[in-house]
Image: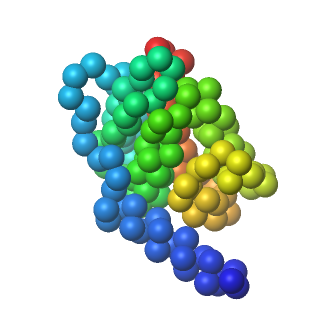
Amino acid sequence: MSFSNLDTLYRQVIMDHYKNPRNKGTIDGNALTVDMNNPTCGDRIQLQLQVEDGIVQDAKFTGEGCSISMSSASMMTQAIQGKKLDDALKMSKAFSEMMLGEDVDTEELDMGDIESLQGVSQFPARIKCATLAWKAMEKGVQEQ
């Protein structure tokens, strides 16, 4: 597949997650809740995690923001469900490295659609948009 076709595919995946977000909503009952925002662009997210025995049983988010931040939140909540907290943190580290333009083996970590965000690394002003949900997840895990 050519770079142009791959870029188009990635854009379609990002827009699909933006227009049809997965796991958007709130968790009923006991959930770890983290509120974060990006003051430079106005993105804001509330992330909720339901963790039992060190495994993310459920992850949901609400918020407002650009297509990059909301798509990233949708992809992240899909990717971490059913994962051990340590694995979710490894995924977050790998995602941060990807945003810095480093090569990351996304298949080893089973990161789903997240690879489609790798082009964001070419736009430094948008990196904080892409990492907002991930930073919220890291904060929530540390506060647990």
- Residue situated furthest left in the rendering: 28
Residue drawn at point x = 68 percent, y = 83 percent: 1
Residue drawn at point x = 59 percent, y = 50 percent: 111
Q: Position of residue 115 (x, y in %)?
A: 61, 59
Residue drawn at point x = 44 percent, y = 47 percent: 78
Q: Is residue 39 visible?
A: no
- Compared to residue 141, the image places residue 94 above or below, namely below
Q: Is residue 89 left or right of residue 21?
A: right
Q: Position of residue 135 (x, y in %)?
A: 53, 34
User: Between 15 and 110, which is closer to the camera in this rendering?
Assistant: 110
Q: Is residue 92 left or right of residue 41?
A: right
User: Between 120 and 42, which is closer to the camera in this rendering?
Assistant: 120
What coloring was used for the rendering?
A: rainbow
- Compared to residue 101, the image places residue 139 above or below, namely above
- Residue situated furthest right in the rendering: 103
Q: Is residue 12 visible?
A: yes
Residue drawn at point x = 55 percent, y = 26 percent: 85
- Compared to residue 131, the image places residue 47 above or below, namely above
